[in-house]
Amino acid sequence: MPPPTCCRTLLARGPSAEVARCSCGHIHLSLGPMTIRLDADTLHATWHTIGDALRALSGMAEKEAAPVTPSSEWKQ
């Protein structure tokens, strides 16, 4: 008897990523040609980590874009 086949339901699709839920409960995160199989808790944790990284990058971009004005005043 062949093993049961899983069925995926597409949850979201963007220009560079796709997320699907499998009937066996796994979440499939596809980034280009690579697919990562996760459980829902790991997907949530990954989402938070990526959010932290995006916030850090935004903060870095703001610092890099801010003009630096030389000052002779001493600052503590």
Image: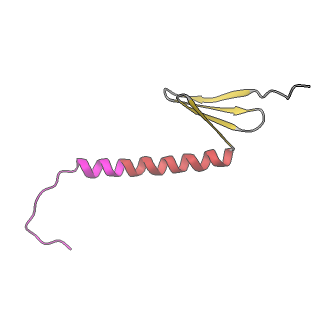
Image colouring: secondary structure
Q: Based on the picture, tell me whether residue 73 belongs to the magenta stretch.
A: yes
Q: Is residue 66 left or right of residue 8?
A: left
Find residue 13 and report its image quarter: top right
Q: Position of residue 8 (x, y in %)?
A: 71, 28
Range of magenta residues: 58-76
Q: Position of residue 60 (x, y in %)?
A: 32, 51
Q: Is residue 73 left or right of residue 15?
A: left
Q: Position of residue 58 (x, y in %)?
A: 36, 47
Residue drawn at (29%, 49%) of the image: 62
Count of numbered circles on the image: 0
Residue drawn at (50%, 46%) of the image: 50
User: Residue 33 versus residue 53: which sits nearer the camera?
Assistant: 33
In what quadrant of the picture does the C terminus appear? Answer: bottom left
Residue drawn at (92%, 25%) of the image: 1
Find residue 73 and report its image quarter: bottom left
Query: Which residue is situated farthest in the left direction here?
Result: 72
Query: Which residue is situated farthest in the right direction here?
Result: 1
Q: Based on the picture, tell me whether residue 35 belongs to the magenta stretch.
A: no
Q: Is residue 52 above or below residue 27?
A: below
Q: Is residue 49 above or below residue 25?
A: below
Q: Position of residue 25 (x, y in %)?
A: 75, 38
User: Residue 9 versus residue 36: which sits nearer the camera?
Assistant: 36
User: Residue 21 versus residue 2: which sits nearer the camera?
Assistant: 2
Q: Is residue 18 above or below residue 54?
A: above
